[in-house]
Amino acid sequence: MISPPLRIALAGIVHETNTYCRDLTTAADFHQIRGERILRTRDQQSDIGGAVAACEAAGIEPVPLLYAQAQPSGTIERDVYERFRQEIVDGLGACAPLDGVVLCLHGAGVVEDIEDLEGDLAAAVRERVGPGVPVVASFDLHGNITQAMADSLDGVFACHHYPHIDLHERAAEAVHWVAELARRPAASAVAVVRLPLLMPTTTTFLGIGEAWLGRMLAAESTPGIVDVSWFHGFPYTDVPAVGSSVVVTARAEPGARATAARAAQKLAQDLALALWQERERFRPTSLSAAEAVAEARRLAGQEGQGPVVIHETSDNCGAGCPGDGTHLLRAMLEAGLEKACFGFIVDAEAAAAAHRAGVGATVEVALGGRYDELHGDPLPVRGYVKSLHDGRITLQAMFRGAPLKLGPMARLVVDGFDIIVASRRSQTFDPEPFLALGVDVTRCRYVALKSSNHFRAGFQTLARAIVTADPPGLSTHHIEIFPRQRAPGPLWPVDADATFG
């Protein structure tokens, strides 16, 4: 007799909350998909797309509920989150019986009066489906993870890489683990060890980040261990759980859950302690805009192929920033760099002015500097409108196949310098915004963009060298500027007396 296919519910609320942003995040800020629209993500290299594809490849029936995702921004309005949560909980009831649930989450969500979105949501899901239905979640590695999250879950799977090129793969692993738990008499144990460590934005593509990822992945070969997740954490938020963590999911045979829990806890503790002992190796070098331009100029004079890429880490929309900071663009214009392009600055008003004027016109606009004084003053420019675009592009590196809507875009040429202006917030993931407006970055000497590390997925192999600019901004490496009222104790590197172990 052929058994019916497993039925696994898929749902998610994904938001990285920067509590230092001045505005609340509303329902209109969330991209919401349901039902068949969720299933159509199967070819995208995203978390929800990976979950759908894994279900279908394994002969599992995916039961799509709600997937709501917003650009990193300020604290979420409570009624917005509660509506999303209720929709997911009600959907689980309506679709019962289920063999499992996979949640696609971030790990750094903050709601008005709810400092742990993911812990709250996981608890609500667990209460609805009961203890007998496995519930597993995939996460962004920038989550601030709590034991409350883990206590409601049967598995935690964070993406391994930064840039997050493997979100789809990790969601697929979550699906496979749910299926295994549903098919055999086994249980799991999840251990969370938090470090009082505010991790700088550290790529896993090279250096200490790459080395430490290797150690974490090697630890997964420990007998009985299903997954080791290294959460860098999200430091641009003020919550008790802020910090880095190591989370271990272990397989528990019938009657041996306590043994599995102890093994998971010991492995997580050992890895966390070793990470703490090497914390000084993660301390970043911080260059002002002018210093970064000078360094880029030096590197451009050396032998090599490709452009020098300057990334403005401190105005990263992927961490909640406005994307309209002018510090780096101003420094590049003042330096008179040749064969240079900047892609992109977020300024809907300037983009609209260029669209009204049309290709071939010359416009005088004040670029950026609209959000606050921290990110720089508006930059007056007189630019030739070289090309225009509707801002609808398809990502080709990280999140390959996923659409990105940047709103009306314009390419302004100012003293031979190409400046791309977009209308909607996003960091730059790959060269597509440049190509949309006719700029081939491989022919440039200098390419500037706003991103902390996700850009590496699309630019690492193209660049002659990469320079980090860190002028004032809401995602600066100078995290000591952010007040901490909710942290339970001292945090490295802000507090020299922070201790662990």
Image: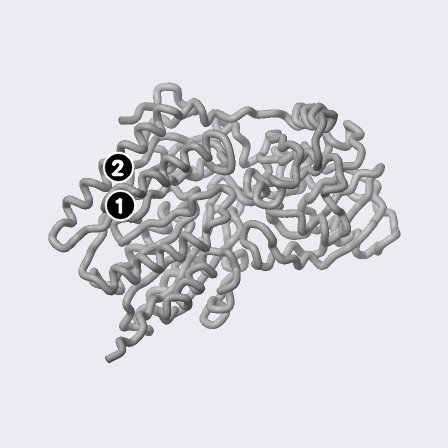
- Residue nearer the viewer, 291 or 299: 299
**Quadrant position of the C terminus in the picture:** top left
Q: Is residue 341 left or right of residue 150?
A: right
**Between marks 1 and 2, how big is the CA–CA gap?**
9 Å
> Residue 500: which quarter of the image?
top left
Label located before the other in sequence (1 or 2): 1
Q: Which residue is drawn at 77% across and 27% down?
A: 335
Residue 431, placed above or below residue 481: below
- Contact check, label 1 and label 2, Cβ < 8 Å: yes
Evaluate whether residue 109 shows in this view: no
- Residue marked by disc 1: 225
Q: Give the percent coordinates (x, y) of residue 170.
A: 41, 52
Q: Which residue is drawn at 74% across and 25% down?
A: 301
Evaluate whether residue 84 shows in this view: yes
Q: Which residue is drawn at 70% across and 41% down?
A: 368
Counting every numbered tag in the picture gives: 2
Residue 163, placed above or below residue 97: above
Q: In this view, does 484 lie to the left or right of 455?
A: left
- Residue marked by disc 2: 267
Q: How crowded is mark 2: few (under 14 residues within 10 Å), some or many (20 or more)?
A: many
> Which element is circle 2 on?
helix
Q: Give the percent coordinates (x, y) of residue 190.
A: 26, 47
State the residue lying farthest toward the bottom: 1
Q: Give the percent coordinates (x, y) of residue 373.
A: 63, 34
Residue 127, placed above or below residue 334: below
> Residue 131: which quarter of the image?
bottom left
Q: Give the percent coordinates (x, y) of residue 309.
A: 66, 35
**Quadrant position of the N terminus in the picture:** bottom left
Q: How crowded is mark 1: few (under 14 residues within 10 Å), some or many (20 or more)?
A: many
Q: What residue type is labelled 2?
A: Leu
Q: What residue type is labelled 1?
A: Ile
> Residue 219: which quarter of the image?
top left
